[in-house]
Image: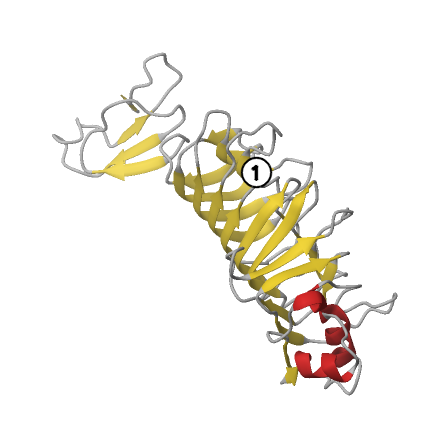
Amino acid sequence: MADAQAYSASQNGLNLCQTIYFILTNGYPSGGKVIDARGMGGSALTCTGTPWNQGGTFVNVPSTILLPAGTIVIPQTWVLPSKTHLIGQGDNIAAGTTLKANTSFSSPMIQFGSVTGASEISVENLVLDGQGQTITGILNQYAGDYTYVDHVGLYKILGTGLSISATDSGPYSNINFDSVGYGGDAKSNVLINILGDTMKHAIGPPIYTVHIANQGYAVSDLTVIGAGNSAISGTYTIADDLTGIQLTDNTVGMYALGKSRNGGYSLFTTSPHAPSWASGTVQPTGTCTQGSIYSCTGSATSCGSKALWGCPVTSSGAWVPIS
């Protein structure tokens, strides 16, 4: 383990990013090691460059970096190499670790990898503060296997909070959004415990906790587990451009979008406000969402002598037996 505070003192008070870069470029083992920067603070938390890039030379080595509590001001994107694990001291902006974009930021705050095939990158236990700018919080275009985000707060980010277009990445779990935009297209990704404060304000959009955008590319095998929103009029917990489904539920337990086939998509959700295939032992009653199907597995009497029920295009919105 390398003590970043000791290195900083020995080099006449380098800031956090300069210190980590110095460690990575001076006698650093090829297999990587833990860099403990938890003892650093004060003016050292205002960075120049990044921990992997000082003056144009990018260092591509594995590491586990323990960041200190407090606010770390960053002037440019932190591009994380493969096998980089960035760990803060908590996702509470008052007492944890906060990475704050400076006021002239115009690019993603954190980017996973720089080329296709990146892997084993993680960020956890910290807050990203965009200072009310239209920027991206975390961008993952390249990193797939063993890549994840956990316990990360996205604060005052008015662009895209989390943009994912890499394949086979995730899970992305315990993410708390102050404001979010929409993510990119993706395959085989899992989003877990996504909490959105997307109440409308004078600044207007964003108004989605999770937005599955249709931008002309293949989006499939996407699972959202535990999405929540304030459900204020004009906002959506999940907005799916591919199926046309827009959910305003306070919480959605699961939303699983499968592959495209014959112009449609396989879909399962626990929300009663989207077409679904449910089952039970008695005949369905009440209103239903158009396109839903119900399988009755009880006796002929309890099922009304019908095993399959559907919700057609009618003004009543009631279940009808399918013959």
The total of numbered circles placed on residues is 1
**Residue 32 x, y percent position in the rendering:** 68, 81
**Residue 228 x, y percent position in the rendering:** 43, 42
Q: Name the residue: 61% across, 76% down.
A: 39
In the figure, 321 relative to 192: above or below? above
Q: Name the residue: 56% across, 60% down.
A: 126
Q: Residue furthest right?
A: 56
Asked if one can make out residue 31 in the rendered structure from this viewpoint, the answer is: no
Q: Name the residue: 60% across, 69% down.
A: 68
Q: Residue furthest left?
A: 301
In the figure, 37 relative to 124: above or below? below
Q: Residues within 10 Å of mark 1 (few under 14, many from 20)?
A: many
What quarter of the picture does the N terminus occupy?
bottom right
Residue nearest the observer in this picture, 50 or 11 = 11
Asked if one can make out residue 114 in the rendered structure from this viewpoint, the answer is: yes
| Quadrant housing residue 8 | bottom right
**Residue 271 x, y percent position in the rendering:** 38, 36
Q: Residue furthest front?
A: 42
Q: Name the residue: 68% across, 79% down.
A: 4
Amino acid identity at mark 1: His
| Quadrant housing residue 274 | top left
Horizontal side, residue 139 vs residue 107: left or right: left
In the figure, 295 relative to 143: above or below? above
In the figure, 269 relative to 28: above or below? above
From the image, tell me which residue sits under label 1.
211
Secondary structure at numbered mark 1: strand
Residue nearest the observer in this picture, 165 or 251 = 251
Horizontal side, residue 144 vs residue 237: left or right: right
What quarter of the picture does the C terminus occupy?
top left
**Residue 186 x, y percent position in the rendering:** 62, 48
